[in-house]
Amino acid sequence: MTSPASLKNKVAIVGVGESDIGKVPHMTGLGLNAQAAKRALDESGLKLSDIDGVLTAYSFTEPYFMLGSVLCEYLGIKPRYSASVVSGGASPAVMLHHAAQAIASGQADTVLVCAGENRATGLTRDAAVTALLAVGHPYFEQPYGGSIPGYYAMIAKRHMHVYGTTREQLAQVAVNTRAHALLHPNAHMKKPLSLQEVLDAKPIADPLGMLDCCLISDAGGAFIVTSAERARDLKCKPVYLQGIGEYHTHEHLMCAPSLTEFGAIESGRAAYQMAGLGPQDVDVAELYDCFTIVPVIELEELGFCKPGEGGAFFADGHARIGGKLPVNTHGGMLSHAHAGAAGGLFGIVEAVRQLRGGLGPRQVEGAEVALVHNEGGILSSHCTVILANAQG
Amino acid sequence: MQFPLPQPVSNADSLPYWNAARERRLVIRQCKACGQPHFMPRYLCPHCWSDELEWVDAKGGGSVHSFTVVRRASDPAFAALVPYVVALIDLDEGPRMMANILGANALDVKIGDRVSVSFEDRGDGALLPQFQRA
């Protein structure tokens, strides 16, 4: 297999933005995207006319045909590079990959990456349920009454069976991320969460309860990517892409090659190889956490602990700010926000902020290298990103 | 409001599968070129891309690879059935499929349990392959 041309040190993220988050009934999904984009652009010091590429993902609440073009039209941008990327939750990291490739090959100079929707207030519960059921196979999964939490629950059950991961360890993931969310001024969740509350929450699909499941938020997120050269004289401290890799193994759970080995192993390997770095070099990790089992598996697959030790890693406090490897320092999708593809995008936003520094009690001291992992589907599509605050 | 359970929907890839189910047979696709079976019928073999495929009868035995007990259904049609079991079944022939575990002792299911196929009436003669603990 040929190695891709390295994107190491070629591009930087020069601005990040979050919309208002939580229940924002006075704004549309496109409006949340626009607010996040405006905040990212303001932070970067770039002008609107500097943006010549736009990438976005998908929206359940505003399911326009050609969402990429619709967003550009809404924002008043006429780009020479544009696409809608539909890799589920993996889309934001995949969009960063596409943006970096476009910039490195001269197809664009500055790319705005944007995603989000008003999923909390823009959909009735029934409509949200119907839309999300579509993740299951229409002919061979949906007739059995599964659900997204149910599919992830089967992965959790298998992990518990093979490795002895416990219900309490999974619950500790939710406790860990909530503690971090309380340090974030814009997080959806504002109240502390105890282990007992997670264990006592309404059961959804064994072993997962309501508080093992990500939020449903109104939220938009954005970041701006440009060449490392252009990034040098901008307002914000640039954060450089060091490595990035993808791997796609299936979409539907019944077709997953394994319930204990997923594509993060390969996407991580590619990202580390491009960066010339390993797990031991990472200071902070922002891992996709649609359900508590997911960051447990990602920790293992990305080499931060051995297979089967991810649950204990969280339960022993190693994933806390101040621990061995702080995970989801913004509160993740479990406690900060989840709104379609914006969920994973906030992992990138947070990694950039951690690498710039100055976050007060939320700051991971001396953070120089951050890893972000996004996954979409049922641990189906994977993209791993390694970022650093200096060119390596 | 009560919703009926969904009937299977067939398409050009899966019509023989659902027709066989109506006769209480579980059939799987097998490649004539490489010999490997696969689940989720398709136009070609996902292992070798041969388009020479045949339908073979599965014996109907398998084991539980993993499962969950659904306590809150996402699909309103299933709301009245909670708690119920959704499982991934490893057929003895090799392929993996999703199904419910039905029967009086379904909620006691464990990973590795032996199961055998049964067929659930979904109306109008449509039968859905399901599994029961052995």
Image (cartoon, grey):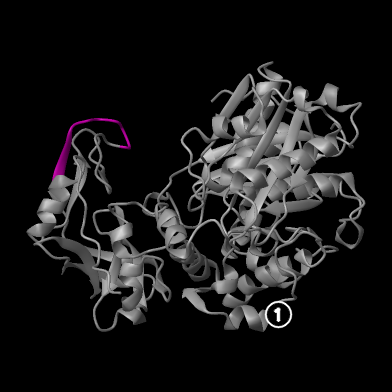
Say which quarter of the image contains residue A175.
bottom right
Residue A93 quadrant:
top right
Q: Is residue A214 left or right of residue A280?
A: left
Q: Is residue A303 magenta?
A: no
Residue B104 on image: x %, y %:
25, 84
| Image position of A134 (left or right of A292) | left
Q: Secondary structure at mark 1?
A: loop
Q: Is residue B123 above or below residue A339?
A: below
Query: Which part of the image, by quadrant, shows the N terminus of chain A?
Result: top right
Q: Amino acid at mark 1?
A: Ser
Residue A82 appears at what percent x and percent y?
59, 26
Residue A236 position in % (x across, y down)? 89, 37
Given residues A346 and A20, the one toward you in this image is A20
**Residue beneath the point at 35% across and 51% down:** A137
Write down the quadrant of residue B111 in the picture. Answer: bottom left
Answer whether residue B83 is visible to the viewer in this image.
yes
Residue A318 visible in this rendered orientation of the protein:
no
Q: How many marks?
A: 1
Left or right of A73 on screen, residue A355? right
Q: Tell whether position B53 is magenta.
A: yes
Q: Pick the residue in front: B27 or A147.
A: A147
Dominant secondary structure (helix, strand or loop) of the stretch shown in magenta = loop
Q: Which residues are magenta?
A: B46-55
Identified at 57% across, 76% down, the residue is A167
**Residue that label 1 marks:** A194
Quadrant of the rendering where the C terminus of chain A is positioned: top right
How many C-alpha atoms fall within 10 Å of the one at disc 1: few (<14), some, or many (≥20)? some
A80 is higher (above) or lower (below) than A206? above
Residue with the most extreme top position: A106
